[in-house]
Amino acid sequence: MSINAVLNFYKPPGMSSAQAVGFIKAMTGEKAGHAGTLDPEAAGVLPILIGKATKISDYLMDSDKQYLAEIAFGASTDTQDAQGLVVKTGTNFPDIKSLHKAVSLFMGEVMQLPPQYSALKVQGKTAYQLAREGKTADLKKRPVRFDEISILSETENHGFLMRVRCGKGAYIRTLCHDLGVSLQCPAHMRFLLREESAGLKIEDAVMPEDIREWYTGGKVDSSLFVKVENMLKYLPFFEIPDALRFKAVNGVPLPVYEITDMQLGKGAKVCLTIGKELFGIYEKTDSHFRVRVMLGTGESKKA
C-alpha cells in the first residue's frame, strides 16, 4: 500500500536534510521531499513529505517555526555557526540586560542578509557551493519576521540560550551574528534545535530508530505518519457535490456558489473533498474554484 503522508521526523545532528529525505525514501520506497532545510549540525523537527504529500510543500514552507538556540559571544565565523572558521574575535562581552535591549531591535519585520553558507540558489549554484569555491554570492537583504525572541538563561563561555519564533526564510545563525554586530562583540550560533515547523512539534517527532523498527516490523504502524488533510487543517474544507464530481475529476473550475455560501476573498485557498477523500487544494477566482494541487482520485464514497 502506498504512503501519502507527512512524517514529523527528528533529524539528528550530523545528518543533512537531503540525507534525511534519502533515508525515508529507502525506508518507505516512496518519493519524498522536505518542507524547509535544517542545517546538518542542527537537530529537531524536519517535516518530510511522502508520496502525493510532496505536492503540498509550498503550503507548509510558509508556516511559522520555533527554535531553541544558543548564541556565543567572542567570535564570529564564516558560516555564522560553530562549524565555521573564526573570522573575528572580541572581548566586549554583553550582559543579559544589554542582550535583552538588543533583541528588542530585531522583533517584528526586519531586513536580513542571508549567509554566504546557505542553500539559496545564485545563477544555478547554491551560495555555499560558491563559498567553498572561494567566491562570494550576490545575495540581497530580504524581509524576515521574528515574533518572539526570549532570552532563557546564561550559559558557559559567554553564551545565552534563547527561544525564537519566526516566519519563513529567517536564519537563526544570522540573527546571532547580527546581534553580535549590534552589541559590538562578534558572535555566532553555537547550538540549534528546531522545536516546531508546519505545526509539527518536537515532542511528537519520530526518531530514526522508530522508522527502522517500523521498516523491520513489516511497515504496519501507520500512526507514525500524519495525514495530508491534518497538515492543511488551517484551510477551510468543503465537499464537492455529486453533480460536480465529473467536472472536478477532469480539472474543470467549479462554481463557488454550488459549493459554499461562505464569503471568501479572491485568491483564498480551500481544500475540497469528494466523500471522505481530500481531493485537492483550490484557489478562488471571481466566481469559481480553480484546482491548484490535485491530491485525490475522486473514487471516494460517502460514509
Image (spheres, helix red, strand yellow):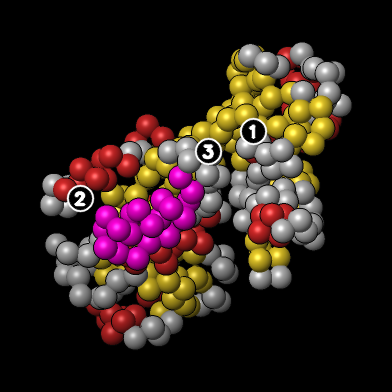
Q: Residue at x 61, y 45 (%)?
A: 167
Where is mark 3, residue-wise? 42
Where is mark 1, residue-wise? 82
Where is mark 2, residue-wise? 215
Residue 296: x and y in percent read 30, 71
Is residue 110 visible to us here?
Answer: yes
Q: Which residues are magenta?
A: 15-34
Mark closer to the chain start, 2 or 1 = 1
Q: Is residue 45 above or below residue 72?
A: below
Mark closer to the chain start, 2 or 3 = 3
C-alpha gap between disc 3 and disc 1: 11 Å
Residue 135: x and y in percent read 78, 59
Is residue 180 visible to us here?
Answer: no
Residue 185: x and y in percent read 82, 25
How many neighbours does mark 2 have within 10 angstroms: few (below 14), some (14-19), or many (20 or more)?
some
Using the image as rendered, state which of residue 296 and residue 130 is in the foreground.
130
Using the image as rendered, state which of residue 88 and residue 254 is in the foreground.
88
Residue 303: x and y in percent read 14, 62
Tag 1 secondary structure: loop
C-alpha gap between disc 2 and disc 3: 25 Å
Amino acid found under the numbered disc labelled 3: Ala
Pointer 2 and pointer 1: residues touching (CB < 8 Å)? no
Tag 2 secondary structure: helix
C-alpha gap between disc 2 and disc 1: 35 Å
Q: Which of the image's four quarters has the N terminus?
A: bottom left
Q: Residue at x 53, y 64 (%)?
A: 268
Amino acid found under the numbered disc labelled 1: Ala
How many neighbours does mark 1 have within 10 angstroms: few (below 14), some (14-19), or many (20 or more)?
many
Tag 3 secondary structure: loop
Amino acid found under the numbered disc labelled 2: Tyr
Q: Residue at x 74, y 42 (%)?
A: 78
Q: Is residue 241 above or below residue 158?
A: below
